[in-house]
Amino acid sequence: MDGAAAVSGQPLPRPAAPAGLVDRMAATWANPRAAVAREIAGAEESRLLFYAFAASLLFTLAAVGAQRLNPAPQVAQDFDQWVTTQVVVGTFVRPLGLYGAAALIGLACRAFGGRGGWRATRAAVFWTALVAAPAGVMLTLIGAAASGPGGAPPLAAALGQAGGSALWAALLAPALAEAQGFRSGLAVFGVFCALAAGVAAVAALA
């Protein structure tokens, strides 16, 4: 039937978008822009909130797992209390941090000519954070396991966390390009560089 449609000049039917959460996450790695376009079109606010909470809890899992594998001396003194603090932070503070990051990134993109709204930016930030989080957890745990016992600083763990952040940025750039109407992710990379320079300047003045 597809061959007949092609011969007659009719457009071939597009493959159905992945329906399940895991399938959609996997598809995002192949085409971040298309995946985020679907999330922007169909994700309700409650779903975006779920993405923010789920990503934050996975980030918390990475931190707790890394300290379990290779605890810092100050953490090892009262590990249970530290875990409780991390869970509270991951449940309440990190999701708010993602909202704040989405607002800041959205303003920066608008300053560089972006045309997307805050909801589209939230969808891009929250969804890519959730998609990148499992890989970030794995890299962080591998880094912590490769570090020396009680290593200070645990360089391998830091490299694992940096790798997770790099993967998130690799997804976030094309996702924000879709959300803000940029032609490519290079413009978003320029926004990231400008934000990094601004943060460095503020830190230098502090």
Image (cartoon, rainbow, N blue to C red):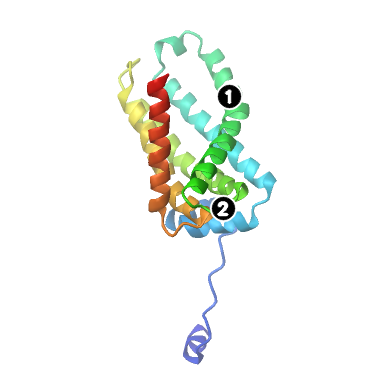
Percent across and percent down for residue 142 are 36, 32
Q: Which mark is residue 116?
A: 2
Question: Which residue occupies the foreground of this view, 184 or 153?
Answer: 184
Mark-to-mark CA distance, 1 and 2: 30 Å
Give the labeled residue for mark 1. Answer: 89
Which residue corresponds to the image point at 30% horizontal and 19% vertical from the top-left?
148
Percent across and percent down for residue 191 are 42, 44
Up-down: is 47 above or below 181? above
Up-down: is 201 above or below 43? above
- Res. 105 in view: yes
- Res. 23 in view: no
Residue type pointed to by label 1: Val
Which residue corresponds to the image point at 56% horizontal and 13% vertical from the top-left?
81
Residue type pointed to by label 2: Gly
Residues at badges 1 and 2 in contact (C-beta under 8 Å)? no
Q: Is residue 203 left or right of residue 126?
A: left
